[in-house]
């Protein structure tokens, strides 16, 4: 589904990522973990077209997508969410998800302004599709609420619903459990599994190790900008190199 080859990112004289390579299998939930400063979010920003890397390539389903901007990647069915929730606060919950369906719309400004029949029909279809994703994420009862008034946990679900509205084949989530309480984290784990069960490949950066070990099929560990380890949750738990990176090496 996704192949990252030799990704290197240098900011000034600092090497944030150094020749990172891995492949993500379709239908898997893959976790990217590592201590603070390991380069996890930088890697996500490169894969999703926010940063342009110093070296290396990104392939999506065999297609070279290196350097493509986020909006073009969305049309190729790759989307992401952010550690800090990014919502249109003055719009309703439903309208936020409708915006996420921009790749499915074709009516222009004039057609909408003059309420042409095809634009009305398209908006109805987009509204129905957005409601489907609100129901999927469990926040359909909040459809008419202003997004900026939502509690943090519901805002996180809205951001995920908006990303899913693009109908992606792969979604990257940057610390989706950040700021959630234990009950919300349990619900998030169930939701991520449901997303995978629809056929969407999931990649997440996450610090909540209990969540990662519970839901991930494979885990990639970064440390100081390099790939330290890769394997199943059990293999990662038993890796002495990973334990040393997190807890220090006690001679």
Image: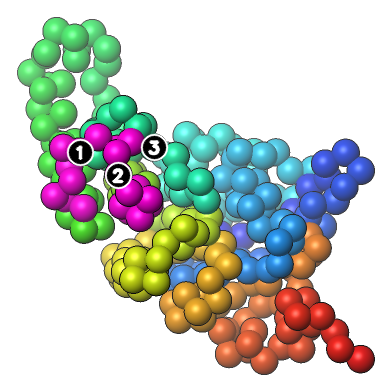
Residue at x-position 73% and y-position 76%: 246
Location of residue 188 with respect to 95 vertically, above or below: below
Give yes or no for contact between labels 2 and 3 (Cβ–Cβ under 8 Å): yes
Tell me, yes or no, if residue 54 can be seen here. yes
Find the magenta span and give its range.
139-157
Q: CA distance from mark 1 to mark 3?
A: 13 Å
Provide the secondary structure element on which disc 2 rests: loop
The answer to whether the residue labelled 1 contacts the one labelled 3, judged by CB atoms less than 8 Å apart, is: no
Q: Secondary structure beneath disc 1? A: loop
On the question of residue 102 being in view, the answer is no
In which quadrant will I find the C terminus?
bottom right
The residue sitting at 76% across, 89% down in the picture is 240
- The reply to whether the magenta stretch includes residue 171 is no
Residue appearing at x 57%, y 84% in the figure? 232
Query: Residue 178 versus residue 196: which sits nearer the camera?
Result: 178
Using residue 54 as the reference point, say whether residue 169 is left or right of it. Answer: left
Disc 1 marks which residue? 145
| Mark closer to the chain start, 2 or 3 | 3
Q: Name the side, left or right, on which 26 lies relative to 102.
A: right
Tell me, what colour scheme is on the image?
A: rainbow
List the residue tagged with mark 3. Answer: 87
Looking at the rendered structure, which numbered label has been put on residue 150?
A: 2
Q: CA distance from mark 2 to mark 1?
A: 8 Å
Q: Looking at the image, which is closer to me, 186 or 28? A: 186
- Crowd tier of the residue under label 1, counting other residues whose Cα lies within 10 Å: few below 14, some 14–19, many 20 or above: some
Residue 173 lies, with reference to residue 32, above or below; the image says: above
Q: Which mark is residue 108?
A: none
Expressed as whole percent of the image width and height from the top left, the position of residue 85 reads: 45, 45
Sequence-wise first label, 1 or 3: 3
Give the overall secondary structure of the magenta segment.
Answer: helix
């Amino acid at each position: 589904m996704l192949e990252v080859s030799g990704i290197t990112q240098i900011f000034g004289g600092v090497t944030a990522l150094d020749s990172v390579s891995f492949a993500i299998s379709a239908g898997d939930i893959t976790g990217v973990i590592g201590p603070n400063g390991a380069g996890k979010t930088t890697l996500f920003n490169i894969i999703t077209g926010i940063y342009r890397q110093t070296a290396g390539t990104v392939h999506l389903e065999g297609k070279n997508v290196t350097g493509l901007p986020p909006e073009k990647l969305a049309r190729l069915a790759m989307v992401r969410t952010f550690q800090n929730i990014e919502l249109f606060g003055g719009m309703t919950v439903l309208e936020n998800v409708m915006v996420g369906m921009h790749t499915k719309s074709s009516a222009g400004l004039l057609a909408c302004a003059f309420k042409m029949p095809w634009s009305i029909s398209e908006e109805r279809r987009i509204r129905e599709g957005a409601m489907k994703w609100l129901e999927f994420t469990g926040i359909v009862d909040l459809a008419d609420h202003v997004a900026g008034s939502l509690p943090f946990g519901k805002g996180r679900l809205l951001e995920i619903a908006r990303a899913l509205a693009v109908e992606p084949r792969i979604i990257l989530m940057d610390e989706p459990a950040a700021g959630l309480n234990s009950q919300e984290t349990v619900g998030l784990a169930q939701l991520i599994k449901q997303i995978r069960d629809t056929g969407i490949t999931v990649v997440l950066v996450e610090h909540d190790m209990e969540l990662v070990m519970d839901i991930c099929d494979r885990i990639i560990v970064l440390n100081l900008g390099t790939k330290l380890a890769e394997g199943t949750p059990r293999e990662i738990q038993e890796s002495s190199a990973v334990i040393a990176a997190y807890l220090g090496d006690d001679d």
